[in-house]
Amino acid sequence: TVQTKVEQDKTEQYQRVIHGRTITQILSAGPMISHTLGRSALHHTFRFVRGGIQMRRPLFLPTLAKRSVADGASSGKIAEQGEPLVRSLPTSASRPNPNIVLYTPESVAKKLNLPSDQRKTLSASERRRNSTYPPLTRPLPDLPPLETVNLAEAPAVEITTLSNGLRVVTQENYKQVASINVLVDSGTEFESDATRGVCHVLEKMSFKSTRTRTTEELREQLVVLGAHASAGIGREALSYTSQVIRDHVGEAVEILSDTIQNSLFLPEELEMHKQIILYEHEEMATHKHAMIGILHERAHEVAYPTSAIGKTMFCSPDRLPHISQETLFSYIHQNYTPDRMVLSGAGVNHDRLVKLAEQHFGAIPCASSAVSHPHQIWGGGELRISDNKSDSIRLLIAFEGFPLKSKEFYTSCLIQQMLGGGDSFSAGGPGKGMFSRLYAGALRKYNWLQSMHSFNTSYRGTGMLGIYAEAPVNAASAVVDIVCQNFLQIQRVADENELQRAKNMLKAMIFTGLESRAIHSDDLARQLLFYGREISADEHCAAIDAVSIEDIERAGRRILSGKPVVIVHGPDQVLQTNELGVPAYTIIEHFFRQGVRM
């Protein structure tokens, strides 16, 4: 992260030229640029993958010192109308430490070899045309060379399997806060008709009363430790996470073990959390932003009508009366076996975590038989949801993507990066996806579009690639056409630059996410659970770099050859299959079949 703070009240001038490069050129390296306005300073942040751009010198310093090429900087005069307004930089005489390289108005102009007669008259456009600023590949003088990430040895990932089958995986990060995660290979796809909704209730009942402590005692201990504990559900796995200072890793592992093995599911606590689930359902039905999640759930139901993975992750109100203490105990006994559990740690010593795992998880008996994962079979179809209180149409169209272990997995991720998208009002800078296809070709072109974004989800045996859009009711037919046309474009890549930008953005997204301790520990566990091994950063990058334009176009044709899923939400007028509403499913399906380039 390269960060500068400058007393400035405008950001648009900053986004014009950086070292003679336009913002579009710099974005080809896949960075994420953002601005944050505070009371005392404006923060410019530039995040990128080390090695993704040749950063041999500070990015912002000469940009903020552009005014230094003109005389009168110290008196507050502006060299050119539109130049950034920055405070005067210190002169060489006021430099407090001669060992610190500080670029001053005089030194910048001198180092850039600007003739004295040009320092007053040279405009910004003229400097760009004359290549006054050196390229990013040439370092400025007096700056120490940067050590690239390839020269720094990354901490190794260590894996140990206990005698009962539980696996322990760790990676050191040399930070003061550790993240401990227990991932259980027992998501909602393992629920039967009799246990439907049990995972959602288990999530709510985590870190409550156990055989060793009450809920109040557990909360007090977490506060004393300064720890954060949470649980999460998914279609394929359940997770329990605790983030704590390194000195208290032992207590964190004991708490995780206690809530997994010794929860009591007291009737009064169970009833209270059932009421919370009912309240959440009421909120989701009225909350505008929650509708996106609901439509994704309904899309799974339509996409996988005969598979357990298509069932909703949330416990429906009609299922709550059927979930009792016995239901929860039975589900844990059948599915929480050590061979289906991974204990992961980011920022913790491996040998120490192995000893803690043997102490707190070693007594769990081995499974009597190997786990059998449910089949994941794509179906396709449509669902039209009537909501006459809505003033918008919400449309979701999706196709079957690729599973996690498929060789086309990274290809589908790159297709999603090229599609991109966002909201009509998106905070942040260009690195947030403003140059993606959906943003540049739809959101910026049609000001009535409220939202349009792509998504890509992969599972063990299947995947889902889709586009979600939201628009006014009177634009129903137009938004369908825009979504379908953009989907057809995944069969072709504009040029190598577009693909390279998608690759850099995908790498940046992966590694930026892994900077989070919780995501880091969770990723370690999921790699071991789904792949059976650790996938290094170099392997990720090599697989991404290996994808060619032909691979993208071939995968696009294969995706579009499948049966689509169409979800429509809105008032009755948009559900009609006439010229004012969304066309019939057969018409949409025929459109894609005709548009596939064989």
Image (cartoon, rainbow, N blue to C red):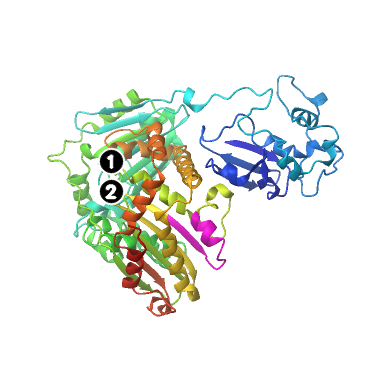
- Percent coordinates x, y for residue 244 in the rendering: 43, 35
Residue situated in front as seen by the camera: 595 or 44 = 595
Which mark, by number, is residue 495?
none
Q: Does the magenta stretch include residue 198?
A: no
Label 2 vs label 1, nearer the camera: 1
Query: What's drawn in magenta, residue-wise?
Result: 437-454
Crowd around label 2: few <14 · some 14–19 · many ≥20 (10 Å): some
Residue situated in front as seen by the camera: 225 or 389 = 389
Q: Mark 1 points at which residue?
A: 530
Q: Which amino acid does label 2 sit on?
A: Glu
Secondary element at tag 2 = loop
- Percent coordinates x, y for residue 486 in the rendering: 44, 60
- Percent coordinates x, y for residue 563 in the rendering: 29, 62
- Is residue 207 in view? no
Residue drawn at (50%, 62%) of the image:
451
Which mark, by number, is residue 236?
2
- Is residue 323 in view? yes
- Left or right: residue 368 compared with residue 170: left
Q: What residue type is labelled 1?
A: Phe
Residue drawn at (35%, 63%) of the image:
278
